[in-house]
Image (cartoon, rainbow, N blue to C red):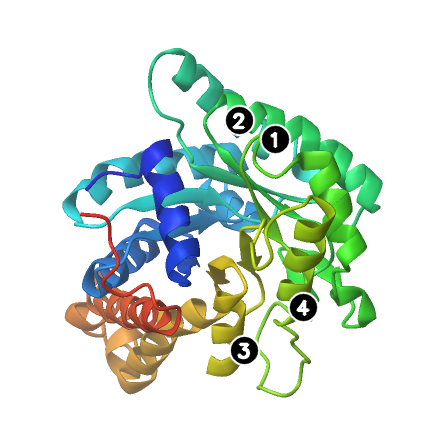
Amino acid sequence: MPIATPEVYNEMLDRAKAGKFAYPAINVTSSQTLHAALRGFAEAESDGIVQISTGGAEFLGGQHKKEMVTGSVALAEFAHIVAEKYDVNIALHTDHCPKDKLDGYVRPLLAISEERVKGGRNPLFQSHMWDGSAETLADNLSIAQELLERARAAKIILEVEITPTGGEEDGVSHEINDSLYTTVDDAIRTAEALGLGEKGRYLLAASFGNVHGVYKPGNVVLRPELLKELNEGTAAKYGKPAGSQPFDFVFHGGSGSSPEEILTALENGVVKMNIDTDTQYAFTRPVADHMLKNYDGVLKVDGEVGSKKTYDPRTWGKLAEASMSARVLEACQNLRSTGTRIK
């Protein structure tokens, strides 16, 4: 199946919301990690989301000039070709983009998709993220309004982060403190600014104690039940039926989350969960294992020349891809998306 059309992506999210499951959103930094993600989704018979952060895009652009737009467009175009060989639908997404990188990342990518749509084609990416969590909520939502209008015209879904996620990712960091919890007032102000779908569809990265990076269960206090409060408070404000879920939530900083925390989040409207730290480790771990076990073959030692079969990137690259794809499959199982692909 191809990269998801705007219509298919909307159907994916609708099905996740109704079925109380979520799609893993896997960060990729190369063609090989892309294949690992696609393979994992295919083996799980789950549609999914592949995403590129600003740092990932810069890395993909090459170390000569480190251009984020070049890197993200190149991998997206590559994905449009290779995804045809996998029997799942894949949405392409750009991850965290702070204010100082909008002009060098999201806005140029929106322009590319705008031109594609004007020419009768589908957008290059299916969704983009605006991370205004370092700004005041007023400034955050003002920029979100501008981006949402452009995204809607380009048949793209916008993701917004309205309150901080703790820890650090791509140079953006927030302390782990009480600011990591979105309030009902924050949610209502978001609905007032962005609407509840009538101004364009958006995904909401609300904070319930989330922290990027690796942590052991219990070291961070997650409150996924808070999402229910945000939905209920906003639904009451807008006269929605009791039990309705106005928001499509995104779960950030999920590494180390317990199964119970994940299930609570799913029950309360999470349709997308970002997974980066765990898949990075899954990709790198077998490479390190291979290098340590085959040290003499990888490096020239005492004038010897090593073993080409050992240092050939394809040898250890296959191990890395298999390990990462297995972690993606596990993520699909944890998020209950296994076997839900749109046929």
User: Tag 1: residue type?
Assistant: Leu
- Rendering coords of residue 40 (x, y %): 26, 63
Give the numbered dot on residue 148. 1
Task: Tell me which corner region of the image, top left, top right, bottom left or bottom right, holds residue 171.
Answer: bottom right
Q: Is residue 269 left or right of residue 132?
A: left
Give the numbered dot on residue 261. 3
Residue 133 in view (yes/no): no
Residue at the top extreme of this rendering:
119
Along the polypeptide, which appears first: circle 3 or circle 2? Answer: 2
Q: CA distance from mark 4 to mark 1?
A: 25 Å
Mark in the foreground, 4 or 1: 4
Q: Which residue is mark 2?
A: 152
Q: CA distance from mark 3 to mark 2?
A: 32 Å
Q: Secondary structure at mark 1?
A: helix
Q: Which residue is mark 4?
A: 226
- Rendering coords of residue 137 (x, y %): 81, 45
- At 20% across and 68% down in the image, what residue appears? 315
Near-viewer residue (233 or 116): 233
User: Tag 2: residue type?
Assistant: Arg
